[in-house]
Amino acid sequence: MRSLRILVVDDSGLTVKKMAKLLEELGHHVVAMASTGQQAVDVYAEAAPDVTTMDITMPDMDGIEATRRILAVHPGACIVIVTSHGQEQMVMDAIEAGAKGYILKPVKQEKLAETLETVAAKYL
């Protein structure tokens, strides 16, 4: 699989660091990080990621609304939701908003690799 440019969005600094480490170990390049939905919307165009990993529950704007806003301006955006167990309805809402897939926390490297390969093959 080719190296992807990835925007990591999560309000937990620890989660962002862990996700960035996993992605880099898989050979991908983290081009930007954001800790709120609004930051994700603001940095998306400049970062120009191939894929965005998007947390759902964040301050100021949740990941579902951020997904909607990014896709409204960048319809080809490839966003993967990263969420905790027990948020199945939120995952469905995110998919309806245009997310291309999801990964459950805690993120396992094998599952992350599999999801990115699937999404890249289908949408990039």
Image (tube, rainbow, N blue to C red):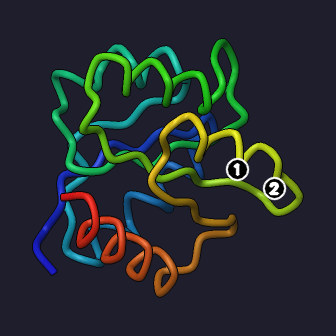
Q: Tell me the element at label 2.
A: helix
Label 2 amino acid? Glu
Kindly indicate the quadrant of the structure image that contains residue 119: bottom left
Q: Residues within 10 Å of mark 2 (few under 14, many from 20)?
A: few
Coordinates of residue 108 in the picture (x, y in percent):
57, 79
Residue bearing the label numbered 2: 88
Label 1 amino acid? Val
124, 33: nearer the viewer = 124
In the image, 66: left or right of 91?
left
In the image, 45: left or right of 79?
left
Coordinates of residue 53 in the picture (x, y in percent):
45, 49
Please report the residue visible at 56 percent of the width from the left and 50 percent of the height from the top.
Answer: 81
Q: Residue furthest left?
A: 2
Coordinates of residue 105 in the picture (x, y in percent):
69, 64
102, 29: nearer the viewer = 102
Residue bearing the label numbered 1: 91
Q: Are marks 1 and 2 in contact (CB under 8 Å)?
A: yes
Quadrant holding the N terminus: bottom left
Please report the residue visible at 30 percent of the width from the left and 50 percent of the height from the top.
Answer: 51
Q: Residue furthest bottom?
A: 110
Q: Which mark is residue 99?
A: none
Residue 9, above or below 18 = above
Quadrant holding the C terminus: bottom left
Q: Residue furthest front?
A: 96
